[in-house]
Amino acid sequence: MTTSPLSELNSPHIARAKALASAGQLLARARAERDALSPAEAARLAHRPGRMSLTDLEASIRAQRERARTIRSTSAA
């Protein structure tokens, strides 16, 4: 039995690959938007009552961004 080359276009593997590519693009855009925010604004948007204080959350965001900068600079060298 032969299959049409067009039937491969609807393959579950291709659908999965397209879904993963779309999800990756969405995640990249969301991270870029998040990273464009100041630490204070990011903390304000992420804050949930009853959890970490706004001040601690902002400090955590600053520390995480500093770690990320350090990792990028050492891996680029």
Image (cartoon, rainbow, N blue to C red):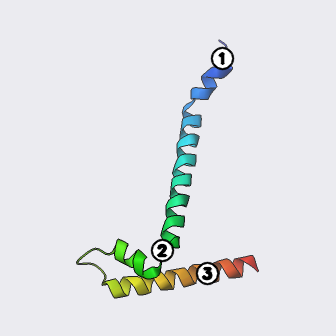
Secondary element at image label 3: helix
Q: Position of residue 37 (x, y in %)?
A: 48, 74
Q: Earlier in the sequence, mark 2 or mark 3?
A: 2
Q: Which label number is shown at residue 37?
A: 2
Q: Which of the image's four quarters has the N terminus?
A: top right
Task: Count neighbours of disc 3 (C-alpha within 10 A) and say few if under 14, some if 14 to 19, many if 20 or more.
Answer: few
In this image, 48 relative to 24: left or right?
Answer: left
Residue 70 spot, x, y in % from top left: 63, 83
Give the quadrant of residue 77: bottom right
The kind of residue tagged 3 is: Arg
* Left or right side of 37 for 47: left
Q: CA distance from mark 2 to mark 1?
A: 50 Å
Identify the residue under disc 3. Answer: 69
Tell me whether the residue at label 2 lies in contact with that at label 3, contact meaning CB atoms closer than 8 angstroms: no
Q: Mark 2 and mark 3: span between their CA atoms?
A: 16 Å
Q: Which mark is residue 4?
A: 1
Disc 1 marks which amino acid? Ser
Amino acid type indicated by mark 2: Leu
Q: Is residue 14 above or below residue 25?
A: above
Q: Are marks 2 and 1 in contact (CB under 8 Å)?
A: no
